[in-house]
Amino acid sequence: MDPAFITPFIASIQHVFATMMQVQVTVGEPQIRSAPTATYDVSGIIGMSGDVVGSVVLSFPKASAQRLVALFAGQEFDTSSPDFADAIGELTNMLSGSAKGMFQGKKKVTISCPSVVIGPQHVVARPKDVPCIAIPCSTDCGDLVIEIAIAQAPVAAANA
């Protein structure tokens, strides 16, 4: 994966969390992730297509997700609430949308509507030939991770 795709996600998570929830994010060392399961129990998932293809997952432990959603939405929600899933999806959307705007070379990229999966050991299908880079993050509300599995689209696919 092109390292130029990682930096925008780091800048985006710090900006989105500081702006929307007044939460500072400490970013750990990115690492390659090979396990098919998401890191934590609550995941927002966004697909990317166009000049860049693949997926981005924002994954939280349940307790961290609940604390962050309460700050973001201004009220607490149970994880079974549709509003909880909507908030996770919107955070994932904001992170991905902001990051794609920072890609070098003015790439034309479309992001999908977010999907949210809640439950232990859920599997996120990723593109086969694209490594997944996990960026661990910590906040005063708990840990989370950004799992990025994106790559430059082949020239024929990008122009189709």
Image (cartoon, rainbow, N blue to C red):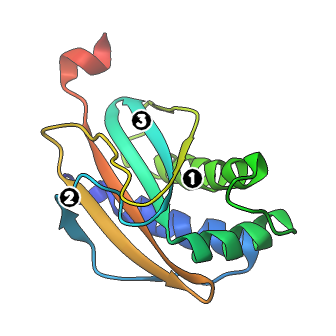
Query: Which amino acid type corresponds to the residue marked 3 in the rendered image?
Result: Met
x and y, in percent, of residue 15 in the image: 61, 69
Which residue does the image show at 34% across and 30% down from the upper left? 51
| SS for dot 3 | strand
- Reading the image, the residue beneath label 2 is 35
Counting residues from the start of the chain, the first of labels 1 and 3 encountered is 3
| Label whose residue precedes the other's in the sequence (3 or 2) | 2
Of tags 1 and 2, the one toward the viewer is 2
**Image point (37%, 42%), residue name:** 55
The span from disc 1 to disc 3 (Cα, nearest Å) is: 12 Å
Q: Position of residue 88 (x, y in %)?
A: 63, 55
Location of residue 157 (image quadrant): top left
Extreme residue in the top direction: 160
The circle on residue 92 is 1
Q: Would residue 19 be found to the left or right of residue 113 on screen?
A: right
The residue that disc 3 covers is: 48
